[in-house]
Image (cartoon, coloured by chain):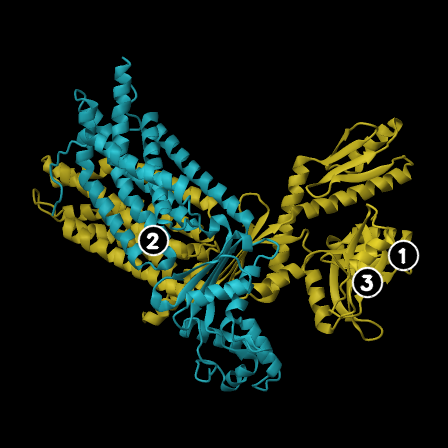
Amino acid sequence: MEFFRNVNIDFLGKKWYFLAFSLVFSVAGVLSILFWHGIPWGVDFRGGTLVYVKFSHTPDLGAIRSAMDRAGLKDPKIQPYDQPALNEVLIDLGIRETSEKALDEGKTKIINALETNAPAGKQDLNNASSLTIKKHLLDKDPMHLGTDADTKYTAQAQAIVNYRDKVMGGVLTSLDLKNALGVDPAAASSLPDGFFLSDFGVRNVEIVGPQVGGQLRTQAGLATLYSLLGMLVYLGFRFEWIYGIAAVVTVFHDTLITVGAFSLTKTDISLTVIAALLTLIGYSNNDTIVVFDRIRENIKLMRREKLSEIVNRSINQTLSRTILTAGLTFLTVLALFLFGGEVLRGFSLALVIGILIGTYSSIAIAAPILVAYQDWRLERGKRPVGIPAAKGR
Amino acid sequence: MNKNLLYKILFIVGTMLFFLFGILGVPKSLKPDDLLTALTDHIHLGLDLKGGTHLILQVQVNDAVNVDAQNAMEVLRDQFRSRKIQYTDITQTDPQNNPDHIVIKGVPPESRSDLRTIVQDRLQEYDVTSGADNSWNLAMKPSSLSDLKSKAVTQAIETIRNRIDALGVSEPTIQEHGLGQYQILVQLPGVDDPGRVKEIMQNTAMLEIKQVIDGPYTSQQAAYQAKNGIVPVDQVLIQGNTLGGRAEGEQWYFVSRISAISGKDLRHAAPSTDQNGQPNVNFQLTREGGQRFYNFTSAHVRDSLGVVLDGRVREVATINEPIRDQVEIKGHMDAQAAKDLAMILNSGALPASIHYLEERTVGPSLGADSIRSGIRAALIGMVAVLVFMLIYYRGAGVNADIALIMNLIILLGFLGWATMAGVNVALTLPGIAGVILTVGMGVDSNVLIFERIREELRNGKTPPSAVDQGFSHAWITIVDTHVTTIVSAAILFIFGTGPVKGFATTLTFGLLANLFTAVFVSRVIFDWVLSRKQRGEALSI
């Protein structure tokens, strides 16, 4: 089977269309970053408190909001998370409710606000840690243990927590745990003495203080910059400087459009999204290098031809590989986007967009830059140095 | 088959066995359950998959510098007294931000050389410069300052590790975090209650013994009123807090800013009981600390001493006679409190206080969901790629698929071997994504080579020479593409934390393994296929 055989498309002839296409997307992204949504930094970078809450029933966002208001938490973002059937809600307190002095205050306030039915003197079993449960068991001593009560009750508490989190998915709806695996009936029957059940459990908490956020932003910026610089130097060394510059401009174009897309769709840029961006820098560069390598090879074979002709031929020769690889990588990334779950959503979105753009740009941006540079030199009456030289063999 | 080829095949089989051992060790049996246990024994899951607590702490390194500067000031006062040098004042100019900047005022010009000698002999870490009006400025040498700060971080890590070990958390990660910002990363798998851990870590902040100058007062205002609102520079007002939390209303004390001794002078602490059978804590001082404490207590007989823990006065006692190395904290605590306090003191005092910068808890149920979806995505992506390669390249597709599977085995085996070697490389959720990406990008090398071979065949080359040309041309490109991707991954590894590091690790080793499988293994398979073909027979590609 073969998709591309003896294709001969005049890619360079379409450079103005490409330029228009790229401009539209980059400008839209830049405008969104500057005037609309800004860069939608995730909690890793902007700081704040995120609490992922799972309810035992369909959550009532209005009721949650008024509970937050009563607790004095100012405009939290409250939104459903993941699939509706999972009854999960993400509560996002901005950086104003997060100070480094009392980092987890916001979390505690949220939990207290949601425990609307708390009877006095009882604790919420859905949000109790195994240590709290162990302490209760030690106090009540329902199993009448003498020595090694500590170890046995630790194991009991662990079994109760395991049942809640692993078997029941995080929220219990009944305090009757007599039939839970590994839980002693006597221990189970003592639970109602000290505990009640709320209708939610906290699945996941992320609290990032203001200092870390700023520091991470700088680091992410530096990481991207160093990555680009590393490419520039390596390609300058392996090819010629203009190749390095063309590759870096191309990759920058890809990064800009991807970040722009995040801004347009208001998707949070988390730490893992930055990881995806850096991977894209590497990936998009792969494509560019494959084309450049072929250009370098063809320049030796086709000394009489015009550079634009050589570049066109090189793109066409590698087109089959470019499309196949892009298609296959896209396939894996698409699987990640569709089936990888909510946690990886941003990460796989960055890759889905980036792989499309990265493949496009190695043909539509990198190669035309080489030709444009050469034309510019010829216009100024200089020899077309730079390009034909082929190092690194 | 020629001998050379046979050796290569044996080498590949050996490598595969080596990495398979890394993944599974020697499983008890081939039943799925045993295989799964063997797998989880060898490849550790990251916190985001296992559930647990992740904390980032900031060590307030200036605390440690401050302690050193206070010491230096004490040394200066001491020396000036014994050498009979006059001075009007010794203070820190900016105790908050630059605690090491000390200014000495009113030193007569003739004592100049004496002062220099003192600094040279006793305070080698400091630079001294003269200022206006007979004043002198001391500041710590930049190298000593950064040494002191990084020592504070190392010591804090050690202390926190001791404490967490005492809690019995399995496989904790406690290490310096970031790039020289004096931060510590603490990861505790399976701990769902960060509150308790933070309590233990914080409880154990600083121990100091200070002179109690005035007090107790019943409130902050009362204390200030007693001094007419003016607190002398060498004193601080701190709250009292009796051990065991006995409620007696508030107590406030004026204590000396300088500590007689601090936690680092401690050698050993033990819970015990006093003559009346009351629980107390006994501690011994180091030789040097004991000497200093002896000098101090000799000079302050009949004065009051306060044991200050975490900036709270825990105990006040009168000095009856000079004390050398045995100190006792007594009263107002039960046996458990005495035991805890001794544990805390023994694990070493934190050289500086800590702030929390970041706290994340991943519930175990979330981790389990993530693993399920991550693995599902990986399998779907991989099967899609494997099937496509088979359809598109037929015979050579088998070759690519073998290379791809070997690539995965090496990657996972590498993680397993690294774990066995005690290197902390856990498989995180982004790490699984890295594995998936490796599949996608790894197949690129095969595609590059195969497309080139097809091209050479079209140009009329014979199969053996087309394979040869295909590999040698594609090789250059493959090296270039791999180097650039590994450069980005390496930068990620340096800058990233936790999950991102896991991603960078799997991506890097996936790509390195790819060089071996897509180029070497694939070539051997081609050679083997070619060796079985008649001259002129077509290649399935």
Q: How many labels does the image show?
A: 3
Query: Could you say whether the residue bearing mark 2 is in a helix, strand or loop?
Result: helix
The Cα atoms of the two marked residues, 3 and 1, are separated by 21 Å
Query: Where on the picture, by quarter, is residue B312?
Result: bottom right
Q: How busy is the neighbourhood of tag 3: few (under 14 within 10 Å), some, or many (20 plus)?
A: some
The amino acid sitting under disc 2 is Val
Label 1: few (<14), some or many (≥20) within 10 Å?
Answer: some
Report which quarter residue A151 is drawn in: bottom right
Any part of residue B387 in sight: yes
Expressed as whole percent of the image width and height from the top left, the position of residue A376 reads 28, 19
Q: In this view, does A315 lie to the left or right of B376?
A: left
Q: Say which element carries label 1.
A: loop
The image quarter containing residue B158 is: bottom right
Looking at the rendered structure, the kind of residue marked 1 is Asp
Q: Note whether residue B29 is visible.
A: no
> For residue B218, which numbered disc appears in the image?
3
Chain coloured cyan in this rendering: A
Mark 2 → mark 3, Cα distance in angstroms = 64 Å
* Residue for badge 2: B435
Q: Colour of chain B?
A: yellow
Q: Mark 3 or mark 1, which has the lower sequence index?
A: 3
Disc 2 vs disc 3: which is toward the camera? 3
Image check: B223 left or right of B377?
right
Is disc 3 placed on a helix, strand or loop? Answer: loop
- For label 1, the residue is B303
* Image position, residue B526 (x, y; %): 19, 46
Residue lying furthest top in this view?
A: A381
Which residue is more in the foreground, B81 or A46?
A46
